[in-house]
Image (cartoon, grey):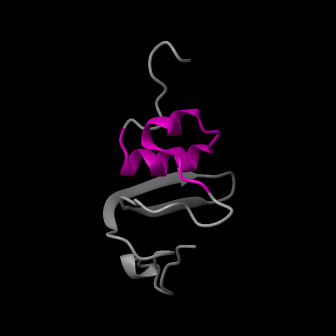
Amino acid sequence: GWTARVDGATTAGAAPFPADWRRAGQIGHVFTHFALELEIFHARINDDAPSGHFWSLAHEISGEALPTVMKKAIEAAIPGATKRPKGMQ
């Protein structure tokens, strides 16, 4: 997975695989016992997902069962992707 340097800084060099990674901003999320800040990167991937994994297309993400923190991360990279279209609540 993606890792941060010891000082907490993140770069595209820490990505789990090579791609044209671009910064999408930061998000914050508060859990019961700690606060988390994430630096979000995104890339367009045209290859198949690695074995045992799958990609969700941007227009399909709203139907995925995701925790709130992951929805925030996705929204930073793909605004509107986690919102269900009207009439599909």
Q: Is residue 3 visible?
A: yes
Camera-nearest residue between 28 and 59: 59
Q: Is residue 11 visible?
A: no
> Which residue of the protein is positioned furthest toward the top in this rendering?
87
List x then y, in percent, for residue 22: 30, 65
Task: Say if 16 sits above or below 80 in the image.
Answer: below
Q: Is residue 30 magenta?
A: no
User: Is residue 65 left or right of 18 when viewed as pictured?
Assistant: right
Q: Quadrant of the N terminus?
A: bottom right
Camera-nearest residue between 1 and 10: 1
Camera-nearest residue between 30 and 26: 26
Residue drawn where x is 52% and y is 34% of the image: 62
* Range shown magenta: 54-79
Dominant SS type (magenta):
helix
List x then y, in percent, for residue 14: 45, 80
User: Is residue 78 left or right of 63 when viewed as pictured?
Assistant: left
List x then y, in percent, for residue 45: 40, 60
Task: Say if 4 sits above or below 52 in the image.
Answer: below
Residue drawn where x is 44% and y is 36% of the image: 59
List x then y, in percent, for residue 24: 33, 57
Q: Quadrant of the C terminus?
A: top right
User: Is residue 72 left or right of 12 when viewed as pictured?
Assistant: right
